[in-house]
Structures are given as structure tokens and as C-alpha cells.
Amino acid sequence: MRIDVVSIFPDYLAPLGLSLVGKAVAAGTLDLRVHDLRECTHDRHRTVDDTPYGGGPGMVMKPEPWGEALDAILDSAAGRPRLVVPTPSGRRFTQEVATELAVAEHLVFACGRYEGIDSRVMAHYADRFEVDEISIGDYVLAGGEAAVLVMVEALARLLPGVLGNPESVVDDSFAPGAMAALLEGPVYTKPPEWRGLAVPEVLLSGDHGRIAAWRREQALARTERFRPDLLGDGA
Ligand SMILES: COc1cccc(COC(=O)c2cn[nH]c2)c1
């Protein structure tokens, strides 16, 4: 998979060189290319934004630099990449969307700032990109870069050979399946007692039936407490 990221703060994407994503890049599973949008400006002040038509607060990102940046990526692209634009006004990012992105050949992330990117950019490229405006949550960030870090990490761990233990993807809280639509319950490891707190004895019992039942009960209780919406039947 090839991933391009276009941003006026390319250094913000440096964490993608670390840990799990960094290993996938080193292994060649991910071909990651970060581009500085300001290299596509040619005025003295390297202008990327201007005031919004129709008035209103803030600034809007100008279309010209984006046109130059996205044309350059298309010139070196094979098929029809997916253009992912992180925005508060996009479709909701979920584990299911992460699995969709994980099977793409080529993702291009456009990091918007200010009040957003001139809408003509997404309209202009609708035939050469699969344009996908995605929100990682109902809040407003200063720019799309942090959302790209979130989405790339979520999709990278689904790529073959990236996770040490592929099993843990199956058990993910939000992976498809009966139990999976619940939140994860509590987890424990050694020592068996820590600062006077013991591990629930069922987990030390070796009785796998009891353990599975206890874990489901804990997952249900946690889901009822924090995410009753996941329990359906109008809960
Ligand atoms: C492209 O237009 C804009 C406009 C404003 C902010 C941003 C950055 O993204 C977010 O704030 C966000 C993404 N998911 N949840 C919040 C992009």
C-alpha cells in the first residue's frame, strides 16, 4: 500500500515513522510519502489560505496549491487513489471504515486547516480520486494531521504481517461478530497481587468456560455503563 499525506506541517506526521507504522514502512508493507503543501505555493509569502467568499470568520485553504500537489501525486499514481479528507463534517470513522481503508492500494490524505479546503478541490478531483471525507469524532481540531495519525494507525494494524499477534485483531472491541460488538472488559497480568489488589480468582482458575463467561459478563457491564448504544434494542 502507498500512502501520501499532504500537509503544511509535514513534521506533524513524523510519528508515522515510529512503532507499528514505522515497522510497516521499514518492512516495505507501507510506502509512505509526506508532502509539504507550501512547496506548491509560488508567491513571496507562500500563501495557502485566504478569506472565505460569503464572509464569516477564519480562512479557507486556496485551491491552487492543492491542485498542484494532487496533480503531482496523480502523475506518479497507478490506479484511482482514495482521497481521504479528515474533517468534522465527514462520515464517521469506525473500525469498519478502517478495514475498508486497509484494503486500498493507494491512499492520499489531505490535511485541511483553518475553516477547511476550498470545496472545488474535492469536486474537481471526483473523477480521478475516490473522494472520502471522514470525521474521527464530533470535535474540531486545528488541522487534519492528528486525524491522519489516528486513521493510519488504525488501518496499519490490520495489514497482514504488521501485528505480532493477528489474533488480537479478531478480538478487537469493534471487530465484526457476536461478542465483538461489546467493549473490552478489564485485563490483568502478573503479579497476582499488587498493592493489596488481587487478580479476580476466576482468571487464575484455569476453567476456560468460567473465564469466558466472566469476561462476557464484564464486557456487557462495561458496555451498559459506557456505550448502551452498542446494545441495540433502543438501549
Ligand atoms: C478539511 O476541513 C477541516 C476543517 C476544520 C478542521 C479540520 C481538521 O479535522 C478535524 O478537525 C476533525 C476530523 N475529524 N474530527 C475532527 C478539517
Image: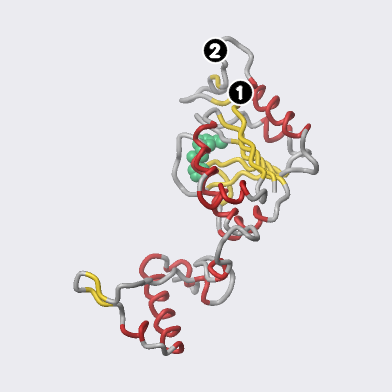
Report the number of numbered marks.
2
Position of residue 66 in the picture relative to residue 184 (left or right)? right
> How far apart are the alpha carbons under marks 1 and 2?
14 Å
Tag 2 residue:
45
Tag 1 residue:
62
Label number found at residue 87:
none
In the picture shown, does residue 217 fall above or below 83? Answer: below
Position of residue 59 in the picture relative to residue 118 (left or right)? left
Position of residue 140 in the picture relative to residue 10 (left or right)? left
- Estimate how packed mark 1 is, as few (under 14), some (14 to 19) or many (20 or more) residues with alpha carbons within 10 Å: many
In the picture shown, does residue 160 fall above or below 80? Answer: below
In the picture shown, does residue 159 fall above or below 147? Answer: below
Q: Going 59% across and 53% down the picture, which residue do you hit? A: 156
Q: Going 65% across and 48% down the picture, which residue do you hit? A: 30
> Residue 53's image quarter?
top right
Camera-side residue of 222 and 189: 189
Q: Going 57% across and 35% down the picture, which residue do you hit? A: 111
